[in-house]
Image: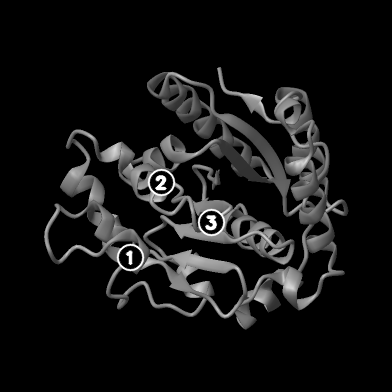
Amino acid sequence: MKVWSVANQKGGVGKTTTAVTLAGLLAARGHTTLMVDLDPHGSLTSYFGYDPDTIEHSVYSLFLDASPERPAVMDIVRDTRFERLALLPASTALATLDRQLGAKEGMGLVLGRALVQLAARFDYVLIDCPPVLGVLMINALAASSHLLIPVQTEFLALKGLERMMRTLTMVTKARKRPLNYLIVPTMFDRRTRASLDSLQSLRQHYPGELWKSVIPVDTQFREASREGMPLSLLNEHARGVIAYTALLNSLLSPESGAQMQGAM
């Protein structure tokens, strides 16, 4: 089982879109795929028709002290209406974890230990991370073999990337082993100077860590969100799907180790 996290310390850069689209493409290729929502806002959970405000059991349940009432991780996994695509949902209660458990020893490994129990069931796990550094992001990065960092091609998003890179350095030291990562330019609009300048800046500052292509602006992602389905299943010929297919092919290629750099 391969575990990929999608993270950036800025919201609105395409994290959920990246997780959903890659998961849909993997499932379409025959891979059993689990999506994990670690964001208290629950965008990924809502995407597939579950309410993070009222859901009974969620990722939050994994962090509760052991008790007869705590469900097993297998019992938290929810089916979607799409074959080979499942969800470990979020609840808004996740927002309280740092206050409740942030200083408690061992809290950074909860998710990884739970996912081990699912290794026989899923080929891939994609984790949609919150946009803030805390116990949830630490869990995601600790559990992952690969990290995707979507970066909107605009100035403020580049600032968020700087924070993410500092976090990555810190987490790698704690892991005591490299975490492979790839920066993915998103929401690129070649008609705007802001997108062109931001992409040029990414290429100058992160030449070895940057995916060679871009994810373009595509309004069909909104339509897919309204339908509650991956865009690849709604319109496989959409330009956003074509771009994410190229990204997935890059990640799965034998040369992907050379494309995803180890954090220093």
In the picture, the quarter occupied by the C terminus is: top right
Closer-to-camera residue (111/190): 111
Dot 3 corresponds to which residue?
A: 122
Q: Is residue 153 visible?
A: no
Residue 140 marker: none
In the picture, measured across the screen, residue 150 lies left or right of residue 74, that is right
Q: Is residue 185 visible?
A: yes
Could you say whether the residue bearing mark 1 is in a helix, strand or loop?
A: loop
Dot 2 corresponds to which residue?
A: 116
Q: Of the residues shown, which amino acid type is indicated by label 2? A: Val
Q: Of the residues shown, which amino acid type is indicated by label 1? A: Ser
- For label 1, count other residues whose C-alpha is less than 10 Å away and answer few (under 14), some (14-19) or many (20+): many
- Residue at 71 percent of width and 28 percent of height: 257
- For label 2, count other residues whose C-alpha is less than 10 Å away and answer few (under 14), some (14-19) or many (20+): few
Against 184, is 70 above or below?
Answer: below
Dot 1 corresponds to which residue?
A: 58
Report how far apart the C-alphas of labels 1 and 3 lie in the structure.
18 Å
Looking at the image, tell me whether mark 3 or mark 2 is earlier in sequence order.
2
Report how far apart the C-alphas of labels 3 and 2 lie in the structure.
10 Å
Looking at the image, tell me whether mark 1 or mark 2 is earlier in sequence order.
1
Report how far apart the C-alphas of labels 1 and 2 lie in the structure.
17 Å
Percent of width and height locating residue 210: 73, 33
- Residue at 57 percent of width and 23 percent of height: 263
